[in-house]
Amino acid sequence: MSYKLIENNSAIPLQQIPVLDYNDFYKETSVLLKNEYCHCVNYYAIPESGGLKFICCIADDKARNILVASFVRNNDETSDIESLTSRHYCMHIFEREIHEKYGIAFSGHPWLKPVRFPFDRKDANSDLGNYPFYDIKSHELHEVGVGPIHAGIIEPGHFRFICTGEKVLHLEIHLGFQHRGVEQLMLQKNSLLQKTILAESIVGDTVVGHNTAFVQAMEALGEVSMPQNTKIARTIASELERIAMHTADLSALCTDVAYQLGSSVLQGLRTIIINTFMIWCGNRFARKLIRCGYEPYPLNPELINIIKQNLDKFEKRYIEMVDKMFDMPSVLARFDQTGSVSKEQNLMIGAVGMAARTAGIERDIRQSHPYSYYNEISHEPVILEDGDVKARAKLRDIEIRQSLKYIREMLAKYDQESVTLKTKPETINLKPDMFVISLTEGWRGEICHSAITGNDGSLIHYKIKDPSLHNWMALALAVRNNDISDFPVCNKSFNLSYCGYDL
Amino acid sequence: MIRTLKIIKHQGKQFIPDLQQVNLPDIHTGKPLIAEYPCKADCAVCRELCPTQAISIQPVTIDMGRCVFCRECTVCSEKIISFSNEYKIASNDPELLKVTAGTENINFNSDFIRKEIQHFFGGSLKLRLVSDGSCNGCELELNAADNVNFDMSRYGVEFVASPRHADGLVVTGALVENSIRALELTYEAIPAPKILIALGACAISGGIFQNSKTLNCSLFEKHKPDLYIPGCPPHPLTIINGILTLIGKSK
């Protein structure tokens, strides 16, 4: 095996990443991806003098490490590259991304369609107006187009259904409308503060998830290690965010099946959690809370008390409400066996996070590649089997209860006597010519940030991967053979990010 | 049935009775306060620190249309800048979003208020949202503005599904090239007279996405927004109070 083994959040010199010949790379990657416990967390290309360097990172969830390898392709090579997707479908989105940006042809790829129409795409003629949808020849089928602007307070994206009567045969999801060029801006912005605020704005509902991934990557590159207390505080924030968003989703699921009481009570309960962030750091989404190399808002006895009280207030009403909700025949009738995605399908598309865990796949970075304080928690991932809307709702419920328990344990461990790094470090100098990968488990699933520094220690490449990049395909599979009227509840049960996909 | 009644009882009254008289916690980052005394000469620490170029010096001024309320500028040893918990910070004039020493309240520019707005929309206002290069933060706060706590629809202000049913358009996000066409179509589909609202630092100035190569702000070049709601994201109370002042419903 030529792949180099590294750990989550560890920086290595760029030249330590083995450079393989493509045939060897193909063979070794193929062997790894056959293993159910291995999945690709990132595969991207970076421009190098005279060509492109392809870097592939595969997480081994059992051995708890990350395998990295690369290959180089010179600009004068014009032949196609044999597609990994033809054997391992989970690689489809990465190869599509590389194809869209650099025009590399992957032979054997079933659909090298555009991903997000980035401003620096290779084919300038490729345009949002001419996305190559699959079309239908049959007279018995019809198409339904929805979006990009949807009926509600929601981000833009286009869905194209092919239906027979009310049944959905196929759904194609066309995104890219939110493309803001985040990866490029990450290099363009000079100060670390600007980059941090940008990281908080990648996905505004996963501020803690994305910002923790960014901050950990920078701290690894700058060789800064944080004290236990800071790790605990970041982990508490991550679990609070999970509770808040899971509660919001359960509320939205109730709205979609017309269960007004659940919708309204859960909305109010989410407010308790996000207002806890407000009292902690002055922002309801935990912006400002996490910073590189210091802890601007350390917890104090008064704050710890408020958090505890809010959790108690939340828990009592939450349990009463959700237990009732899962007893309601009218709710269960809509949730049960709606939008099922099987374990095989989820493995095939490389689903991560909640989508994977509801179909019997043990993929949880908190357990497999622990970061912050997750090492000490000994987190047991929640695994369900059915892969339907009910399982995705139930998973949220169990995870909320788990998070409440974890936060209480951590609050007890937070050492109020110890010194916290409240003051901002003068500068954090990133080590030159390094590569780092940082994985976190946001509430949707696995977030991967990967950075490369140049010879002066500045960032020369930054790659972001939101769980939605994989999981939109799970939604497309979920609605097959379901009534089109069940699309909203299926969509809500995943609640994927448009901006996280479009970047 | 008894379980449902218990839930309703424990839920109690969730709504905030008066949305114009709420006291947010002191730590809420609202309107900046600039000290009256002069700043050190040749010092530009705050201006250099500001991630979105919201600060100009001599005199120290913060443009809330650019500000992402990160509080970093408060580190200055002279303590010139601090933040209050004041959430009524929306205006119809971007110039009035610039806060300097002595700025008390954020006001509306009476010259810019179109007469038909209060005449037609004072009793009921239906809005359509388009997010165009946003991060979903503003959307979450807009949703929250109509939840059981804030309940904006009590004032007749609601979000509708179709632009044809709407009286105005709310835009969030930095306005990017990839959805400018959809945004323009939505604006055109709203019957006149219509209002236009820029919500969040990104919509007002590009926010942290300033200088991105993906931006296209042509809609705001052609049509001037009637209301600017600053924040990253704006608090639901900022949103609601801004809209109420615009339609003449604030006390």
Image (cartoon, grey):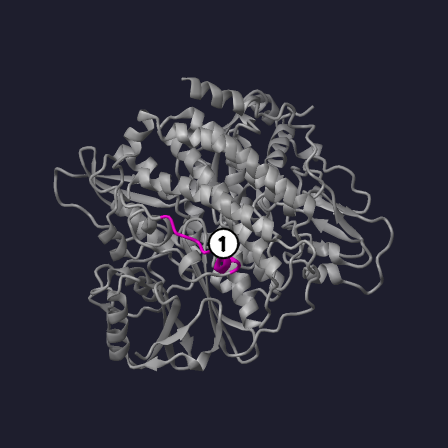
**Which is nearer the eye, B210 or A378?**
A378
Residue B6 percent location from the top left of the image: 48, 21
**Which is nearer the eye, B197 or B5?**
B5
Residue A178 seen in this snapshot:
no
Residue A156 percent location from the top left of the image: 41, 44
Residue B14 seen in this snapshot:
yes
Q: State whether residue A67 is above or below residue A20.
A: above
Horizontal placement of B32 versus A163: left or right? right
Give the extent of the magenta segment. A372-382
Q: Residue at x 52, y 30 (%)?
A: B147
Q: State whether residue A123 is above or below residue A318.
A: below
Identify the image quadrant of the C terminus of chain A: bottom left
Residue B62 within the segment the image draws in magenta: no
Horizontal placement of A120 versus A279: left or right? left
Numbered marks: total = 1
Q: What is the chain identity of the residue bearing mark 1?
A: A
Residue A255 percent location from the top left of the image: 40, 30
Neighbour tally class for label 1: few under 14, some 14-19, many 20 plus, Cα within 10 Å? many
Residue A494 percent location from the top left of the image: 36, 44
Q: Residue at x 53, y 24 (%)?
A: B10
Horizontal placement of B108 versus A104: left or right? right
Q: Which residue is mark 1?
A: A209
Identify the image quadrant of the N terminus of chain A: bottom left
Horizontal placement of A316 versus A485: left or right? right
Majority SS type along the magenta span = loop
Q: Secondary structure at mark 1?
A: helix
**Which quarter of the picture shows residue A17?**
bottom left
**Which is nearer the eye, A142 or A57?**
A57
Residue type highlighted by circle 1: Gly
